[in-house]
Image (cartoon, rainbow, N blue to C red):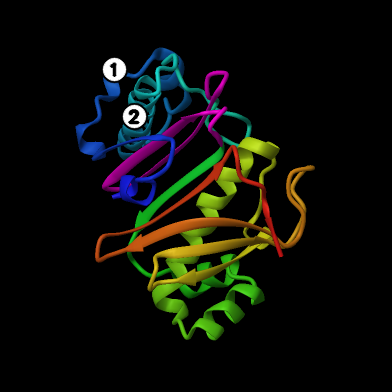
Amino acid sequence: MLAELLADAPVAVREMHPRDAQVERLPHAEAALVAKAIDERKRQFAAGRTVARQALADVGAATPPILWTAERAPLWPKGVVGSITHTKGWAAAAVGRAKDVLGVGLDVEPAAALKPRVFDAIATEDDRQALRLAGLDGERFGKAIFCAKEAAYKAQYALTGTYLGFAAMFVELDPETGCFRAVFRQAAAEAFRPGDVLQGRFQQDERFVRAAVLIPAESAIQRV
């Protein structure tokens, strides 16, 4: 699944089905974050935190409770960069050392097509133009655009600490290669300016749409 999208990356990836998560074994500080959530949400959260700690252990990092920021982004141990994603039916986490990775972002979503009003909310005119130029159908690939943006926003957050809305980037998909480009339409802190590009990979099948973005430490930000 998501591990395939990061097979050649300097990160550890762990995945699991939320049904296998043990909510009762969450550290107290984590359990408090979702104390008022419904059971399904608690299972998804527990699965995400479980695989995140497994990935932390894989890279030799500490495995403390993983809390979150005001935007609910995970708070990672010092010297670590990571990403968590979870939805109904799947959870995954990727973790790397900050000396190797500037940012990483994952997203997994059910494969059901976006409702038209949701597509209208997440797709900019640049997204629509990119779909037209590539000869792609918005109903079929709208969820891939959503996932690609989520993954790219998570990856950039490690560098900027900035929450971005869906209008902050547009996405160019290449289904033949499974690659995409997420192009900034606005600046993000001092790290990114309009026209900067993050490269990613995506997959979609009858169950899920998945996307991943990695910013290696040795790479310069691509600019157009």
- Vertically, is 112 above or below 150? below
The spot of residue 166 in percent (x, y) is 62, 59
Which residue corresponds to the image point at 38% horizontal and 70% vertical from the top-left?
A: 113
The amino acid marked with disc number 1 is Arg
Q: Mark 1 and mark 2 in contact? Answer it, CB < 8 Å.
A: yes
Residue with the most extreme front position: 218
Seen from the viewer's position, the closer of residues 49 and 22 is 49
Q: Quadrant of the C terminus?
A: bottom right
Q: Which mark is residue 46?
A: 2
The spot of residue 144 in percent (x, y) is 44, 65
What span is colored magenta in the figure?
76-101
Q: Is residue 51 magenta?
A: no
The spot of residue 153 in percent (x, y) is 59, 49
* Neighbourhood count class around disc 2 (C-alpha, 10 Å): few under 14, some 14–19, many 20 upward: many
**Residue to which mark 1 is pinned:** 25
Chief secondary structure of the magenta portion:
strand
In the picture, residue 36 is in which quadrant?
top left
The amino acid marked with disc number 2 is Ala
In the picture, residue 43 is in which quadrant?
top left
